[in-house]
Amino acid sequence: MTPVRVLLVDDQALFREALATLLATHDGIDVVGEAGNGDEALTQVAAIAPDVVLMDLRMPVLDGVSATRRLRGEHPGVQVIALTTFDDDEDVFAALRAGAVGYLLKDVSSARLIEAVLAAARGESVLQPSVAAKVVARFAQLSEPPPQALVAPLSEREQDVLRLLADGRSNREIAAKLFLAEGTVKNHVTNVLGKLGARDRTQAALRARDLGLL
């Protein structure tokens, strides 16, 4: 398996060093560069083409939200995970609107961070459970037409997967929780999205909530 190429962006050099050391313990991850602000990050992305960028939000010169917006516009294939100390609504939704596929806090466990990087490289969204709850709550406030009933009901196992998915769990975490193979979980997630008529995991959680499945 080709290692996931990661760029670390944070204005604290000591934190970047610790993060690089932590990620280096996993054979499937290769830290290919570091940057101290958003402007440096854009230069690095153009030069080294990482798969995933771990992006702090509050930095000098160019902040993480602005850098993410420009990065996603110029390099849409590069996935960005916001990794920050703050989880207030303004930061969360600004980062997600800018194109970040994930939002994690710096007190996240090493195992969760590594899984998030691997998940982002696969194109999956990765949200801290508390952040996932904010997203669901915010979108639940939007006015939408009443949801139509499911064409096909969810199986008991698919309902189990849906509940964990709505909590912001990755496929690997769901697999461990339910004692399933990760490939099996991926298939269940695909089925859940299809039955709910959802394009992604967040939309699936919102639709399931509207239907009273959560």
Image: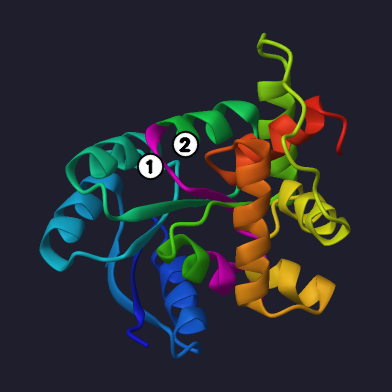
Tell me residue 110's x, y (percent).
63, 75
- Judge whether residue 108 is colored magenta: yes
Residue drawn 76% across and 51% down? 162
The x and y percentages for residue 25 are: 50, 89
Indicate the amino acid at tag 1. Answer: Gly
Above or below: residue 178 compared with residue 85? below
The part of the image, by quadrant, that contains residue 63 is top left
Q: Residue at x 74, y 27 (%)?
A: 137
Q: Quadrant of residue 161?
A: bottom right
* Mark 1 nearby-residue class (10 Å; few <14, some 14–19, many ≥20): many
Where residue 195 appears, x then y in whole percent? 67, 42
Name which residue type carries label 2: Ala
When asked about the image quadrant of residue 135, the answer is top right
Asked whether residue 36 is drawn in magenta, I would say no
Image vertical order of residue 127 relative to residue 208, above or below: below
For the residues labelled 1 and 2, the Cα–Cα distance comes to 8 Å
Q: Are marks 1 and 2 in contact (CB under 8 Å)?
A: yes
Q: Which mark is residue 73?
A: none
The tag earlier along the polypeptide, 1 or 2, is: 1
In terms of secondary structure, where does tag 1 sit?
Answer: helix
Confirm whether residue 110 shows in the render. no
Asked whether 160 or 26 is in front, the reply is 160
Furthest-left residue in this view: 47
Is 198 placed above or below 26 here? above
Residue under label 1: 64
128, 153: nearer the viewer: 153
Answer with left or right where residue 32 lies relative to residue 205: left
Of circles 1 and 2, which is in front?
Answer: 2
Report the residue marked by disc 2: 95
Which portion, as a residue range, is magenta?
98-116
- In the rendered image, residue 174, in percent from the top left (x then y), is placed at 74, 67
